[in-house]
Image (cartoon, grey):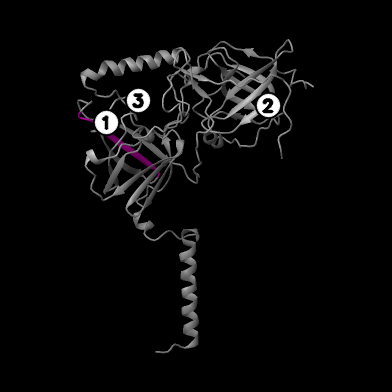
Amino acid sequence: MCYSRPRVRTLARALGALVILTVTGSHVPGLAAPGAAAADRGLTGTWNRYPQIDETPDPKLPVPPPVGPPPLKPEYVAAWEAQQKAAKEADARGQPLFTDYVQCLPDGMPAMMVAMFPMEVLQTPGQVTIVQEAYNQVRRIYLNEKQIPIEDAEPGYWGHSVGQWQGDTLLVDTVGIKEKVRFRGVPHSDQMRIHERIRLVTPDFIEDRITVEDPVYLTQPWHFAWAYKRLPHYKMLEYVCDSNREYKDPQTGGTRLRIDQHDSGAPPAAAPK
Amino acid sequence: MRTPVSGTSNSIRRVGFGLFALLGAGLALAHHSFAMYDNEHQVKVAGTVMGFDWNNPHVYIELASSDEHGETKSYTVECASPGILNRVGWKFNMIKPGDKITVIIAPLKTGESGGLLKQITLADGRVFSNGGPAGKPNIQ
């Protein structure tokens, strides 16, 4: 079989273009990674918790109700209430409790979904990845996989999550959260399971309805929800907690701010250029 | 040799009125609550930047200010995180040691010379907030 010269040149150009596309991948404007389009159900992008503290809610976008108290079994209620009281008293003293979060440990699941800072959702074939800017937290949700047995789930901050789409809603199941990783100070066991219904209400608005189950500590499932609004064009920042000036007061155990005293009023030398 | 700090406009005004309803104890400032600070009795401090620490979990400004008797006092001013500040227009290099600035802060309840930033005015007159979670000033 032989090819005419023009056909060979055309073939060579096509192959060259293919090589360029393969090498540059998604850096080519307008081109996404293969399969990305099929994987994207509209969640990809950056999102801000809604409403923000200083944001007036949009009447068209429902604000989830505040998180209610956990339905703890009676034998655990007193300890939890005492802890809440201690937190309030510590605040009143001006020395908040010295929590793991104050010590720069990530808040893990489900607290990470509070989204104190913006979060990025990435959809790729077989996986949804959620990145929380605060503490560079990452959780991976594996799609269409069977959840591992709960006793096999290695304890961690974000656990082991599997998910599947049901219409416009991503159903997520998470197990394997370390017992020290607590949302609102609520104790939990290694039997805790977190269900989420992440739904794209509009192209720019997500709600995450969460149900926490724990047969050891809770009398019934604990329901709450958060909402997020798209943050267009936002580029996520890094967050490494490498300059923490909060410390534990040795007397009270509360949080104090380290004050760096200067022994002179003289301004330092000009900053290097 | 001591160089005088920005001296004349650095009086500290204590304004003890008004509850700032948005800021209650326990509201989170990214990684700890506001409870260390007295939001009701904010103060205004003018002085010279001695240090600018742009890092997580918080940005800090070390400020030297002279009181009405000419005594120099240092302040540690806690700001929000670089992320929050970026989102309200700050830049990592917009403040340098030696800059003359004015801040409104909620002072530490312990009486130590530090506080939570509410508003900053740079030498060039630009005014920045400390982001939504830290709240607004209740004095001018």
Say which element carries label 3.
loop
Residue A48 appears anywhere in the view: yes
Q: Which residues are magenta?
A: A204-215
Residue A61 appears anywhere in the view: no
- In this figure, which residue is indicated by the disc labeled 3? A184
Q: Nearer the viewer, mark 1 or mark 2?
A: 2
Mark 3 closeness class: few <14, some 14–19, many ≥20 residues within 10 Å: few
Q: Residue at x 39, y 38 (%)?
A: A228
Give the distance between the C-alpha atoms of the residues marked 3 and 1, in whole angstroms. Answer: 14 Å
What's under tag 1, amino acid-wise?
His
Left or right placement of residue A219 versus residue A135 in this view: left
Q: Residue at x 48, y 80 (%)?
A: A10
Say which element carries label 2.
strand
What's under tag 2, amino acid-wise?
Val
Q: Which chain does the residue under circle 2 lie in?
A: B
Q: Position of residue B106 (x, y in %)?
A: 56, 18
Say which element carries label 1.
strand
Q: Which chain does the residue under circle 1 lie in?
A: A
Left or right placement of residue A32 versus residue A221 in this view: right
Please tell me the numbered disc located at residue A223: 1
Q: Which chain does the residue under circle 3 lie in?
A: A
